[in-house]
Image: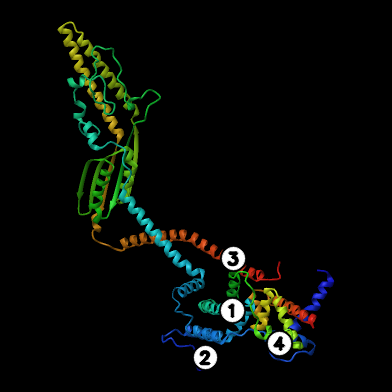
Amino acid sequence: MPAEERPRSTGRRTSGRADEAAIAFDSLYRSSRDDVYAYVAGLLRDRSAAEEVTAAAFERAFRRRRRFDPRRGSPRAWLFGVARNAALDELRRRSRQAELVREPADAAAVEPSDETEASLRRATLATALQGLLPRERELIALKFFAGLSNTEIAAVIGVSESNAGTRLHRVIAKLREACDETA
Amino acid sequence: MRPRDEQQVAEVEPQVERELAAVDQALAGRPVDPELESLVELARELRAKRPEPREEFAAELDARCGERFSSSDGGRASAARLRAWLGGLRPAQLLAPAGALATLTIVVSVAVVQTGGERSGTPEPEAPTIAAQEAQEPAGVNGDAADVAAPMTEDDESAATEDPASGRATSPGDSATALPVPPPLPPRDRLAPGQEQRRVERHASLELSADSDEFVDVADRVVEVSDRYRGIVVSSQQTATDEQSRATFELAIPSASLPAALADLSELANVESRSEGSLDITGPTVSAREQRDDAQAEVRSLRRQLADADSPAQTRRIRDRLDAAREELARARAQVRRLDRRARFANVFVTVTADASGDGEWGISEALDDARALLSTAAGVVLIAGAATLPIAILIAALWLIRRTTVRRGREQALGRDDPAQP
């Protein structure tokens, strides 16, 4: 393991198991940090809230790292489950506030005057994404933003793998239909 | 579902799998079937929309992770850590401290109750005080020679009625020439046929065994119990040999307090034997009072005759009869008093023994006894703690389940609430 990826030493002697657990968490964090943020941001559609929730999710996962049961899924799926709960708690806590102020710039900053096919398609896709239900938006975020497999998505949302695949396909079909109608 | 729909589903599923696989391949950068090029393009466009974190945020989060999410934000961070710690606890981890707290509460409560019970003693006895009783009784408890043979004096004779409480003569009224008026019967003497109040004489015996080093203490406590219930130590005797120490007590305990006194005495040491009995003395009491009333009437009658005597000879004869009647009245009154005392006080015989052979020694048998007592106490505490902890544990588990269900439902509803298209 590269030196820059080694966990910072606390100067105290710790047990071998504690070191392994710390290293495992650090590895999980580094491999999932951006994916978790992307998922949370895609679900909440609010960057500032997404930053708070992402930080809270990792902190919560760190505190509960001993509760992880490998028999129930992969560490990554467990982490996204924690992040999902944190994001849903944020949704519960918020009032019916306005939705995402601004989509990521590369997708939202399409000027109506730009009539290239690609730009129109991106605008169409953005509009279609805006129209998704929160559950549908979550599936897109898990699959395309966070890069989870169908098995991991099923573990995160608590359904069977076939059910998760069916739901995901339905959302994709909906987006395709919206894009094809405009095309 | 209609058969045609089922067929359609069967045909769609392979297509679904194929398209999902194509999405995975596109996201992984692998080549995909050209027929699904539009799907691949969509996947790539969706992937391009992935939000990326700010560099400052990423750096800050990296630092916090390196510090294991400790923060210098004072109370808020402490509260957050407390919440996180509490959230990280398994329910089983809460049971141990809850059980320990419940056990401690039970032990303290039992100790307080027992200490308070010993300190407050027993209910106040209802019997009259010994001083008041001795003021009424000339001697002894259940009567003796002096009590029987006390003759009537001129002062006693002048009384027309008796004190209802004690049976003694009260201040006289003018009864020498007036028509004889039956003295008012005291409440206890209203023993008309069919309306008798039962008079019961109670007795008990108790044999206690104590360790040799506790013998003196137990003996002292027997007297304390008697005093506590306003009883009288009629007699006591202690003997000691090389093999055994023995103390015997004859107590007179107010009958109303007998059960409580026996209970206290039984707690002083090991009870080897205990017996109780009673004797209904209602009949003798009624008879004795009737004899007393008759004797009193006889005395009154003779006094009137004496006042009306015409000659010295007649006067002497009446005086002789009057002396005999007075003696009879005194005997009758004494008998009534004895029977009343027998009903008011119970005889209690207490024997305390201790084997001198075990003095100062502690061997296997004593160790086994102590171990047995200790295990019994420990088992009782565990049982009580379990009985107290179980409802608490059930309550905690129920609350945890309710909270968990409520939170889960709320989270799922949050996905459904935040929907601009939903009505």
- Tell me which chain the residue with mark 2 is part of: A
Q: Nearer the viewer, mark 4 or mark 1?
A: 1
Q: Position of residue B73 (x, y in %)?
A: 45, 77
The correct choice, above or below, for A128 with respect to B110 in the image is below
Q: Position of residue B18 (x, y in %)?
A: 76, 84
Q: Is residue B253 visible?
A: yes
Between residue A166 and residue B133, name the one nearer to us: A166
Judged from the image, the secondary structure of the residue bearing numbered disc 1 is helix
- Tell me which chain the residue with mark 4 is part of: B
Can you tell which mark lies on residue B44?
4
Going by the picture, which residue comes out furthest to the right?
B4
The correct choice, above or below, for B272 with respect to A132 in the image is above
Q: Position of residue B113 (x, y in %)?
A: 36, 53
Q: Nearer the viewer, mark 4 or mark 2?
A: 4
Q: CA distance from mark 4 to mark 3?
A: 38 Å
Q: What's under tag 4, amino acid-wise?
A: Arg
Judged from the image, the secondary structure of the residue bearing numbered disc 3 is helix
The correct choice, above or below, for B394 with respect to A109 in the image is above
Between residue A173 and residue A73, name the one nearer to us: A173
Q: Residues within 10 Å of mark 3 (few under 14, many from 20)?
A: few
Location of mark 3 (residue): B406
Q: Quadrant of the C terminus of chain B?
A: bottom right
Judged from the image, the secondary structure of the residue bearing numbered disc 2 is helix
Judged from the image, the secondary structure of the residue bearing numbered disc 4 is helix
| Circle nearer the N terminus (4, 3) | 4
